[in-house]
């Protein structure tokens, strides 16, 4: 970051960021050269503005290949380290990875997969998934993935619109010490995908190669002939990924992302905002159904080593991942805010169980990171670490708010708005505000804006999703605040904002206070329509089974009154056995809100635990 700043002729980050959004053509051109993007044809210009934000043209005339930009490193350097909860471990060098990609790309070509065709993976976070993605990118196919814990209907909702020709699937996977056989679900998924021509089966490393033969099924290890990869040269806008929204308010949005935009956005975030170099080892706790998997794999473009983990993060013990981080000399460790909260609840002391001397950056996303979690990281993980709470999402396949190795970390705050991203906070009238809550927006185009949605002729759904709230401005759907230090705080999703007596309250404002109590594992706050107004109902999942609930509720109300405000105090507090969450692990406030207000949840299949809603449906008396 400091080197880029000097080369750009700026002397502090605020000045650099202002230049990056006010003169975007100059910024993105300089970034392209600084990061050494490999292209067979250089772009005519970085940006050609258009009347509508989403119609801006990026790097017109450039011809490049995403996979080629990820596979440039010295052949002997380690590219991938695979670990799983059962103790399996393997390594793959960049040279071996290139050879595997060349073999798989040849196999795809032999099956008739061509530029623009779709390839899908229903896979754990394994090397085979990375290989197939890069093989698809090398021939110009579009790649999509889901985790094997997605149910049949959730997979079909995502994959049917893609019309994939090839599906990579796992024979099974380990989870919390159990072997989960994928065979029955795979049969149903294959039957439900009429476009499917071939299924590639990946046995688990510890389960051997024996599989029952079936028509249209090939073992992934026997697929294709060994040969160097050939990289199809494609436009900057060529489709690379289709990724999926959570789907809790209807069928998941199938979001199309361009190869060039994904590449330059991720390289910027890795190299500048995290400081990733070829000497780094990067780990992120993710599955293949979350966009952080796509983000992690792009780390290969910076020449680092990636650690892929399959299994439960808490098996065989809550400190399992920290032991792996020490053993693999991880320098950049990423996880969700919920995971860090779980570590604190389990009294895990990472620095006491593992050698974390090489660890220099810890990343957190998925939900706002509570101030108490900042304390935990600096107390129990490492005192001289860059703690980067980052935010963005599937919609842009990257970050609006990111880390910064040259800035201070302020407790409870995200460090900075990312370079090239004209992020602002608007009030309800569309006016910028500072040190006040409002809507998180982006007022200028950026290269990882989606190409659009599948099955959206004319782009109506795409426009409605991001540009209907404030004309000509991307409205992200987060309730946020720009702080006096120049950082940001996310207060929750805009569609989950509470509005008692006309006062807007972000749910994260409540969670920060309540989840600081030792007895509270997780909280969920929703608005109940009541007596021609809205009142706050707070649900708590506890860390212990035996607790004086009335005393706890009293402490919750007192803490909210003192540490937030009287208007944050809920009208009802209810202990819940479980809270509904999406398949990617995020708590679903919207599902609970619909249930307690007597409405149908649009898409229960998008939930990992839809049975949890039965508890909320039975609360008529408590909420009367």
Image (cartoon, helix red, strand yellow):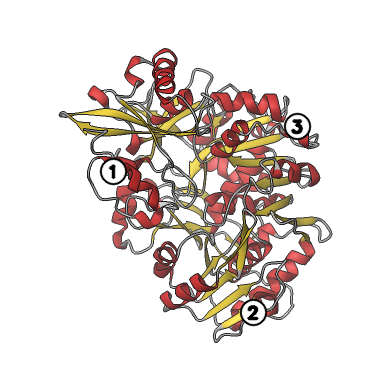
Q: Residue at x 63, y 47 (%)?
A: 313
Q: Is residue 408 left or right of residue 613?
A: right
255 relative to 118, above or below: above
Q: Position of residue 402 (x, y in %)?
A: 56, 35
Question: CA separation, marks 3 and 2?
Answer: 43 Å
Label 1 sits on a secondary structure element that is loop
Q: Which residue is mark 3?
A: 351
Considering every residue shown, the one lying at the far left of the view is: 532
Q: Is residue 441 left or right of residue 376?
A: left
Q: Which residue is mark 2?
A: 211
Q: Position of residue 215 (x, y in %)?
A: 55, 87
User: Comparing marks 3 and 1, which lies closer to the viewer?
Assistant: 1
Label 2 sits on a secondary structure element that is loop
Q: Are marks 3 and 1 in contact (CB under 8 Å)?
A: no
248 relative to 531, above or below: below
Label 3 sits on a secondary structure element that is helix
Residue 356 lies in quadrant? top right
């Amino acid at each position: 970051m400091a080197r880029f700043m000097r080369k750009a002729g700026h002397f502090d980050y605020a000045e650099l960021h202002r230049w990056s959004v006010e003169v975007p053509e100059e910024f993105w051109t300089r970034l392209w050269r600084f990061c050494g993007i490999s292209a067979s044809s250089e772009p005519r210009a970085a940006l050609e503005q258009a009347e509508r934000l989403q119609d801006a043209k990026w790097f017109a005339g450039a011809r490049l290949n995403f996979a080629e930009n990820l596979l440039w490193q010295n052949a002997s350097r380690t590219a991938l380290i695979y670990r799983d909860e059962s103790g399996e471990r393997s390594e793959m060098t960049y040279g071996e990875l290139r050879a595997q990609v060349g073999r798989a790309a040849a196999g795809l070509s032999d099956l008739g997969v061509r530029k623009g065709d779709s390839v899908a993976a229903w896979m754990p976070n394994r090397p085979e998934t990375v290989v197939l993605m890069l093989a698809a990118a090398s021939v110009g196919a579009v790649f999509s993935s889901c985790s094997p814990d997605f149910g049949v209907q959730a997979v079909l909702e995502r994959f049917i619109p893609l019309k994939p020709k090839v599906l990579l699937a796992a024979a099974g996977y380990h989870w919390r010490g159990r072997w989960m056989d994928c065979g029955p679900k795979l049969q149903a998924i294959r039957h439900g995908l009429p476009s499917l021509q071939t299924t590639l089966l990946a046995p688990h490393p510890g389960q051997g190669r024996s599989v029952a033969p079936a028509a249209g099924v090939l073992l992934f290890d026997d697929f294709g002939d060994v040969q160097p990869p050939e990289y199809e040269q494609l436009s900057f806008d060529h489709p690379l990924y289709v990724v999926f929204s959570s789907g809790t308010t209807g069928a998941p949005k199938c979001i199309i992302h361009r190869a060039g935009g994904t590449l330059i956005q991720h390289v910027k975030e890795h190299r500048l905002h995290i400081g990733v170099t070829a000497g780094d080892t990067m780990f992120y706790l993710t599955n293949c159904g979350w966009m952080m998997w796509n983000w992690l794999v792009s780390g290969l473009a910076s020449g680092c080593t990636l650690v892929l983990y399959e299994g439960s993060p808490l098996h065989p013990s809550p400190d399992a991942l920290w032991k792996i981080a020490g053993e693999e000399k991880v320098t950049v460790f990423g996880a969700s805010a919920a995971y860090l909260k779980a570590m604190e609840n389990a009294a895990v002391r990472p620095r006491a169980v593992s050698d974390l001397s090489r660890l220099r950056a810890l990343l957190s996303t998925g939900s706002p990171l509570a101030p108490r979690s900042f304390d935990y990281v600096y107390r129990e993980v490492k005192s001289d670490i860059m703690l980067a709470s980052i935010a963005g999402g599937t919609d842009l396949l990257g970050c609006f708010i990111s880390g910064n190795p040259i800035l201070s970390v302020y407790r409870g705050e995200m460090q900075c708005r990312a370079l090239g991203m004209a992020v602002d906070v608007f009030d309800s009238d569309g006016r910028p505000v500072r040190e006040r809550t409002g809507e998180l927006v982006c007022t200028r185009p950026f290269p990882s804006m989606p190409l659009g949605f599948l099955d959206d002729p004319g782009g109506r759904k795409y426009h409605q999703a991001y540009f209907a709230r404030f004309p000509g401005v991307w409205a992200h759907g987060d309730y946020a605040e720009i702080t006096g230090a120049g950082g940001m705080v996310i207060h929750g999703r805009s569609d989950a904002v509470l509005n008692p007596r006309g006062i807007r309250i972000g749910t994260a404002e409540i969670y920060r206070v309540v989840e600081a109590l030792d007895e509270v594992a997780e909280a969920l706050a929703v608005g109940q329509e009541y007596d021609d107004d809205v009142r706050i109902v707070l649900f708590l999942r506890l860390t212990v089974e035996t607790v004086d609930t009335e005393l706890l509720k009293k402490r919750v109300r007192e803490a909210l009154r003192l540490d937030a405000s009287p208007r944050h105090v809920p009208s009802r507090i209810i202990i819940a056995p479980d809270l509904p969450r999406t398949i990617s692990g995020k708590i679903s406030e919207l599902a609970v809100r619909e249930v307690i207000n007597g409405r149908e949840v649009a898409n229960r299949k998008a939930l990992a635990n839809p049975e949890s809603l039965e508890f909320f449906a039975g609360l008529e008396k408590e909420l009367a």
